[in-house]
Amino acid sequence: MIVRGKLLDLPDPTRVQVTAVLVDLAGERAVGYVSGAEGEITGQDAVTPGSDGVWELDLTPNADVAADAGDTAWAITEGRALDGTPNVTYIVVPASGGPWWLGDVRITLPGTALGTGTIVYVPGPEGDPGPAGADGAAGTPGADGLSAYEIAVAEGYSGTETQWLASLQGADGDPATNLVQSVNGYQGTVSLTAVDVDADPVGAASSAVTDHAAAADPHGDRAAATSALSAHAADTTDVHGIADTSVLETQAGASSKVSTHTGATDPHGDRAYADGAKLAKSANLSDLASASTARTNLGLGAAATLAVGTSSGTVAAGDDTRLSNPRTPTTHASSHATGGTDPVTPAAIGAYTATAGADLEALRPDLPSDQNLLAWTYDPNMAGHVTAQSSGGVAGRVTLVRLIIRKQITWSNVWIGLAGVDTGATLANCYLGVYDTSGTRVGVTADISTSLMSGATAKALPLTTPFTAVAGTYFIAMLLNGTWTTNSLTFKSSGAGISVNAGLTAPNLRYSNLLTGQTSLPGTLSLASQSTSIINTGWASQWYGVS
């Protein structure tokens, strides 16, 4: 394919050599091959431009070149620059068209040889002009230019502006001397005909075109062309230089053979074999060699061949009432009794025997219900100690004792064991209350000061409003205020002392104290702040009951 270029602005272009070298897309020299041609393709001998600077190379199209490096290009060197650097242009030579000018097939190398199929953008032909752009913004008005008179003065005119204007008007012409003298040799009023201007009469051209289009052979060559086409279509000896004419067929012969092939029963000789080697759609699997083997291969059991029904030898459907009928079991409790057909022993269900009941009753500890109570902190029979504390140590403090409710109850009263009464005490703002594990007060008594001044016995002190206590952990709070003689005002308590909280931490201590300076029980307490600061000073864990 011919590629041309031109060297510009050189005093003697014939002194420059132009060379072409095959390269890969990284710009490195490459070795290529062309199918059907001998030898390697690496480049071409240098050529010398003509005196006009035009040079010409005959290069192999890059699409025809196979190279280990993958896609290729041609590196065209047009001499060197003044600093000695080669003037190199990379091109891809198309497979058709041409001759091509160097600039029309110029490319930019990607810089990496990526193998066959690398995308390289080659300049295409110039496209159609695009639509006109929008008008730009109006520019700033320019300065007024010189008037025609001012230009005339600048060119040497010396008269006034009035004189200059008068000089622009010429003398009136003479109508008699300014008329057209003749038309096509005629004077006066002239009418021209088609003959006068060498034109055909009206309609002559249209008639000639019609006659030409209707003629059988207006140019005298149609018969020859038709004959040549017919001869070409029937030729089976030498068409377009094809030597092996035995593979050629006339159009009519080819159409006939295609029709014969299409209508043949078994044109390829394999239809009978194919029909016998496949299942026929119309047979609906009745042509299987072995239905039983097929079911086994599909993993289907014996149920695959059974009908749906309710009798023996059938399978049940998903909506069979036998699968969903909520039938009441037949009474059969007697079969599980002693001597029955299916007796159930206490050991089988983890139960004690009837004779063991008396033994268990003897081992059972006393319960709150045995004393008409709903719950207690511990058996009151174990409350063998009393609290002993001065008013200065506990007045204004909130003391808490943990209690666990095992089942839901209605909580109406808090029981205390008043062990000692100080008749000379001065008491006020004394309360009992109940808090849940969130620290929220759920029950409280009225001021119990009067109840603490007499009757050393177990006392039920009512809550102002009974409440429903669900099973869980609660804390009974006591708040005392006033003055009394140490060891005179006392309550029944345990002797556990500091061991009462063994293994426990706030907010789950069994016995603790909170706050100081309180005159009423607060609506909420921070149980995480539970303290044991007064346990070691004689104020033990009080006994409480619930009813």
Image (cartoon, rainbow, N blue to C red):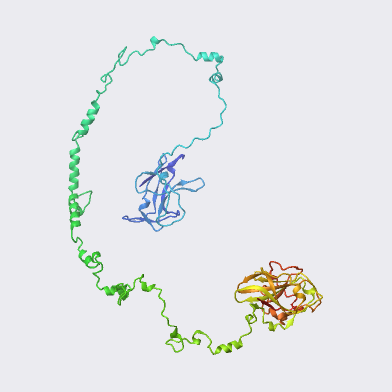
Q: Indicate the position of residue 53 as horizontal and vertical percent values.
A: 42, 41
> Residue at 21% across / 61% down in the picture?
268
Q: Indicate the position of residue 116 as horizontal and vertical percent values.
A: 40, 56
**Can I make out residue 99 in this image?**
yes
> Residue at 47% across / 13% down in the picture?
170
Q: Indicate the position of residue 312 as horizontal and vertical percent values.
A: 30, 77
Q: Indicate the position of residue 340 as horizontal and vertical percent values.
A: 43, 88
Q: Is residue 473 left or right of residue 537?
A: left
Q: Is residue 277 left or right of residue 24?
A: left
Quadrant location of residue 298?
Answer: bottom left
> Residue at 19% across / 46% down in the picture?
232
- Work out whether 157 lies above or below 246: above
Taking depth in this image into account, of 48 and 306 the one nearest to the observer is: 306
Taking depth in this image into account, of 301 and 327 the one nearest to the observer is: 327
- Work out whether 12 lies above or below 307: above
Q: Is residue 304 left or right of residue 400?
A: left
> Residue at 25% across / 20% down in the picture?
195
Quadrant location of residue 216?
Answer: top left
- Work out whether 179 lies above or below 21: above
Residue lying furthest front? 455
Number of numbered discs on residues: 0
